Image: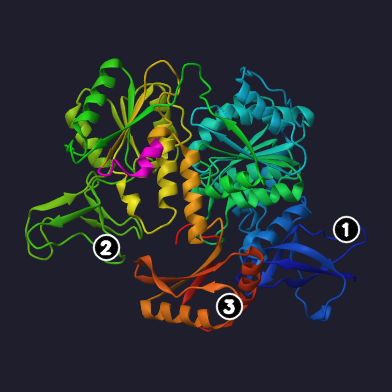
Amino acid sequence: MAYCILEVVLDTPLNSSFDYRWPCQPGEEPQAGQLVLLPFARREVIGLIVAIKHDTEVPPEKLKDALDVRSQLSPLPERWIALARFAAEYYQRPVGEVALPGLPKNLRVPKTVALDRALKKLARLDPVQDATATGMPVLNPAQQEAAAAIGQAEGFTPLLLYGVTGSGKTEVYLQACAQVLARDPSAQILVMVPEINLTPQLEGNISARFPGVMLATLHSSLSEGERMLHWLAAHQGQARIILGTRLAILASLPNLKLIVIDEEHDPSYKQQEGLRYSARDLAVWRARQLGIPIVLGSATPSLESWHHAQSGRYRRLELRERAVRDAVLPGVRLIDTERDRPRDGLTGELLKALRQRLERGEQSLLFLNRRGYAPVISCDACGWISNCTRCTAFMVLHKPENRLRCHHCSLELRIPRHCPTCGNVDLQPLGRGTQRVEEGLQAMFPEARVLRIDADSTRRKGSAQAAFETVHRGEVDILVGTQMVAKGHDFKNLTLVGILNPDTALFSQDYRASERLFAQLMQVAGRAGRAGGAVSEVLVQTRYASHPLYGAVMRHDYERFAGSLLDERREAGLPPFMYQALLRAEARELPIAIEFLEQARDCLPAGGILVNDPIPMTMTRVHNVDRAQLLVESASRPALQAFLREWVELLRAMKSRVKWSLEVDPLDI
């Protein structure tokens, strides 16, 4: 019997491919890109064929036989495999650890029942689709210019759509999509958003605009069956528009013609565990690979994208006015909390503004990026505070659940009745979270309908969407929320935004903190006054009213603020003028992690690469594991990549009890 050799990659940390035998009938050879069931280390696992060979260094009779080739599934495209290879090389991971986890879980199990069922369901769908757009509103001149530039772009064209909040970026996306589909009804368009809770509203807009087009959604809240069905629809070209979060960039899209990255500045596009990839950066690479346009939209672009636009690498499109007639950007005022002392976290001026909105039947939003009731409880008698026993963090008070909870390791304890150290029964909460603000509002405004939206109140599937629909229906007077409410939502009757306690980010050791704070404030401020008519305002409670960042927020002046930050980054040698990688080490004791990093630092001549000394991480201990880090920097990306390739091989060869990981282009240092 004639055999061919299947070169496959597996989801393992081993940086190599594996050879298996498969009996080849004439004209029925497997193809690169097909999935295959294999025996591996006493288990049956799914692998991805990356090449077909007819000879090997190992005698064929010594190779194991593959068990099954998933021939019912069309092969993954060659360009998709190239994307996985690039991501693996750039982020210094084995190809199998990129390619296989990028597939739905139900495709990576030995049994094919779920796959066969999904394929049958898709086969019953009508293959004829009508790509005609309906309900197209008239755009203002700036929107028309932007939509035309995107829709008519040819080849690899990166476009930065810089538009103030409420300027109608979504409508520009939709009308550009209509132009692409009008030219090629079989084209596929990938639209990405940073967070799951932003998908329902945009999904509704897309479905209403393109009722005859199949829409697939891809995000982690889908059940495994739903995710596989939508992934297959995209893979087979049946879904014309694919809407998803960062994992969607790894979807198989054989006829992709346009990529849209909404809120491109958002750090949620960076995966923070496993393969630590940037979906935005991979999207740009994928657009270049395919020779298609990509749109990066934001009211506060990342400094990397802004720098690319300034240098001419990206084409900048601008929307400087709000799309709705008579809708203007809200006025921003600062409330000095040294002069107007807060009561229950709210100043007199903010309370007055809230009451005015209640009397006028308008909605208000209070933004506090801290969930729970209070960040900590303490004992005034002896100074005890509610530290987590497993992390260098506080146990956060969650009063409704009568629990202390660590937001890092999820440890939960009952609230103690007395101080564990001295027995004092008078334990006090310090600071405020969204639960405490909600409680205070209900006491001060008993007639108001108050709703809190944060990670605690929206744990159940579908609860976030239901909560936002309640706000949109006008059944909420005062909305209290974290960053979940800060972006992407179009609240028609919201005229007041109050921002509580933003000052902590001003003194962070993270050099990106001011960039993130500015973006966050501009985004949440943009929720007000989007429908026009009523006068809207944003009130920021701060102890540092003279800080330049707040001055830029008051002027809605992103351009000057971004320019000053870029000047600072250039002088300090920080991204985007420097390229970085971060080696993290975890051990039961901090000295062990530090020792490993010292050995890593000394194991390879730097050769022009700046290798910093190892230091403990800011959050040193998490779940009884100590953590340290070592930063590597270079002014040349190719030089850094060459160093990392050699360095990672040496790190893999080091025998150590330490768990380590490497992150390229880290966001948190």
Give me the C-alpha separation between circle 3 and circle 2. Answer: 39 Å
Label 3: which residue? 606
Q: Residue tagged by mark 2?
A: 388
The secondary structure type at the circle numbered 2 is loop
Which amino acid type is shown beneath numbered disc 1?
Glu
In the rendered structure, does residue 282 fall within the stretch colored magenta? no
Q: Are marks 1 and 3 in contact (CB under 8 Å)?
A: no
| Badge 3 density bin: few <14, some 14–19, many ≥20, Cα 10 Å | some
**Looking at this view, is 311 or 641 the one in front?**
311
Q: Quadrant of the C terminus?
A: bottom left
| Residue lying at 29% horizontally and 16% vertically, measured from the top left | 360
Residue 75 location in percent, x, y?
Answer: 77, 53
Helix, strand or loop at mark 3: loop
- At label 3, the amino acid type is Ala
Q: Quadrant of residue 534?
A: top left
* Of the two numbered discs 1 and 2 in the rendering, the one whose residue sits closer to the viewer: 2
Q: Nearer the viewer, mark 1 or mark 3?
A: 3
